[in-house]
Image (spheres, coloured by chain):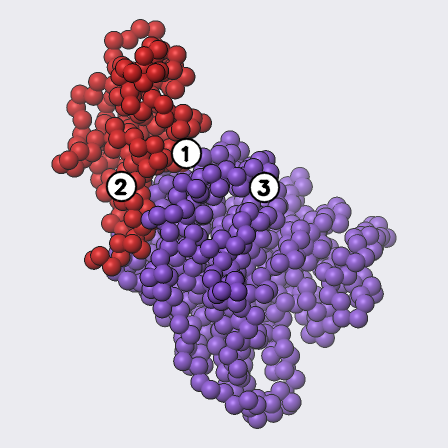
Amino acid sequence: MYHYDEYDRALVTERVAQFRDQVARRLSGELSEEEFLPLRLQNGLYLQRHAYMLRVAIPYGTLSANQLRTLASIARDFDRGYGHFTTRQNIQYNWIELERVPDILERLAQVDMHAIQTSGNCVRNISTDAFAGVAADEVLDPRPLAEILRQWSTVNPEFLYLPRKFKIALCSATEDRAAVMMHDIGLYLYRDTNGEMLFDVMVGGGLGRTPILSQPIRRALPWRHLLSYVEAVLRVYNRHGRRDNKYKARIKILVKALGIEAFASEVDAEWEHIKDGLAELTEAEFSRVAANFVPPAYLPQPATDLGYGTALAQDAQFTRWVQRNTHAHKVPGYVSVTLSTKPGGDIPPGDVTAEQMEQVADLAERFGFGEVRVAHEQNLVLPDIAKADLYCFWQAVCDAGLATANIGLLTDVIACPGGDYCSLANAKSIPVAQAIQHRFADQTLLQDLGEISLNISGCMNACGHHHIGNIGILGVDKNGSEWYQFTIGGAQGKQSALGKVIGPAFSAAEVPDVIAHLADVYREQRIESERFVDTVARVGLEPFKARVYQREEASA
Amino acid sequence: MNNLIRLGGEGAKLVDADPWMLALTLPEDSTALLILSLSDWLARQPEAVLRAEQISADAVCLQPDDEAEQLEPYLAVLPLIAVHFPTFRDGRGYSQAYLLRTRLGWQGELRAVGDVLRDQLSHMRQCGFDAFAVREDKSAEDALKGLAGMSVLYGRSAIEPRPLFRRRDTL
């Protein structure tokens, strides 16, 4: 974990005081709403359908147990007892009063947290792999450089009024679990044969109305140039990005308009001016930050644990959970565990109660090293659990209601808050997710369908990332009523792909049936253990369309 | 201009009598000292000014669409450069200021004009502005409170070329 020093602490403390004053001036009428708007957005505060929503940053998804307890206390004392974890490793509180926001921020500052730049046309929270630092397939820990980027981008005066929001993600594992290719800047971090840290830099990704996957702009960027290169990209974007139309203002539109080569040469020309000299990162700074991320004191584990083996042999439910919800760890004898926030029922995906947060914090201390992660899929991760403790741990997770064995399965739905909360939404997301989870509650069926990502967005702003779901559902408004358009074949990770629309939209009531038809076609068409997305890639949309729309006509 | 704050050796001060007038459209006739749009400025200068051999009587104002580099040939003869913020949400002026100070070497007055408000003043200052024509319906005295901003800046700025990681251990 990164521990704040006096500079970091001074910044968040002064920021709270500054925003307290701005809120007071808004309440007194001294600041107009128009003047206040970007100020509150840059402090994470949105005005939603019913109340203010506060989005708190969880930089690169890493939390201490104590920080999670603070998030729980905020849910309890300032909200309705729960919080909503997002795809970009933030937490959102949906029922916030403006007057109390400075007190919330003050409470966050006490545990080295903030809500700075979680919204607004600026560089947002830096995100990465939830298994950073522990994944077996990781090349090196991306978190020190993520923290360095977080600091550099925080209240960077030149880049606070960009044409539009700006998202950066890093990944340094074989598998990209950070959706790097849908970010404005995506960074693949690796080492060359001499051990030098390098980046492959991607630019111009983003979803929204015009979904575009990022393109490579520079290969093998030495880590020392990280900040100057990002600065060059941002300066070119700040100067030349469109500002006449908010739907054409993301960097992806500029990159597309210029073409990647022309954009890259603009960036290179800018970078030439700044790449060497004071902006260059130093070994000392990297070491200072990296010292915060030294691995915990893992205990040597027996090569085979008898108790664990017995539990696997005797408890099928436990075994299923281990198969679905644990992830391979760097250190022998350990696993990382994903706690599912998607049990179905009336719980919206990503929602966690204050009590659960406290339970997770306790579990992190009792079984792990006091650390918790937030995953892109809106789940929580305990990164370091010894296999020897796993059965006991699982029972405690069951008690907390976070042991649904559905990670990566159809019911592990990614969904935005949708029309229940969000004033931008065209349609509700949560009831649709719940209806699907209800329809596919049968574990045997669910396991048989295997890996399918299902993403739901309540409008084309695409917070549920529907474009990159194997099945994507987009809420649309047709003459004042809510309809749902389906895409299939989307994927995230290094094989990222944008899903293709299968045809006209459906009503909310029809959605579970449509999924069932898609699932049927997959089961008929799949070859051996082929995944849903691979079947779609192989057979194309037609068999799926034929079934979905034929049935609809027959029933009409 | 009214409502002007200027930084100086002894800190920030309200300026009582500023002789400059912002004239983004060229007035018919005026005896005031004018801050002109780049195209008007270029059109009005005698040859000697354009050859950078004579100080200009007029100041220039960059609009967001202008490039700071366009001023490079004239930096030696400009009395003042203004940067216009048509709305405070348009952040191009920050990059223009930063480039003028750090790359083009402008050392004269750099004045923020337009939608210039208290809550952005510290960012403007860090990007190199040293004069701020606060929007006329706002109190410049009140805006002074916004100049200091926060004590910590992680990155570099026009007034502090070293990022914090090069200053951290000097404490």
Chain identifier for the red-coloured part of the image:
B
Chain identifier for the purple-coloured part of the image:
A
**Apparent side of residue B58 relative to residue A217 in the rendered image (left or right):** left
Residue A502 in sight from this viewpoint? yes
Which amino acid, by three-letter code, is at mark 2? Ile
- Badge 3 marks a residue whose secondary structure is helix
Q: Chain of mark 3?
A: A
Q: Chain of mark 1?
A: B
Q: Nearer the viewer, residue A479 or A528?
A: A528
For marks 3 and 2, give the CA distance.
33 Å
For marks 1 and 2, give the CA distance.
18 Å
Q: Is residue A307 above or below residue A292?
A: below
Who's the residue at 73% across and 65% down the image?
A531
Mark 1 or 2: in front is: 2
Q: Which residue is mark 2?
A: B159
Q: Are marks 1 and 3 in contact (CB under 8 Å)?
A: no
Residues behind callouts 1 and 2 on a single chain: yes
Which of the numbered marks, if any, corresponds to residue A260? 3
Label 1 crowd (10 A; few <14 / some 14-19 / many >=20): many
Residue A522 x/y as whole percent: 78, 63
Q: Chain of mark 2?
A: B
For marks 1 and 3, give the CA distance.
22 Å
Which amino acid, by three-letter code, is at mark 1? Arg
Residue A315 x/y as whole percent: 63, 87
Q: Which residue is mark 1?
A: B92
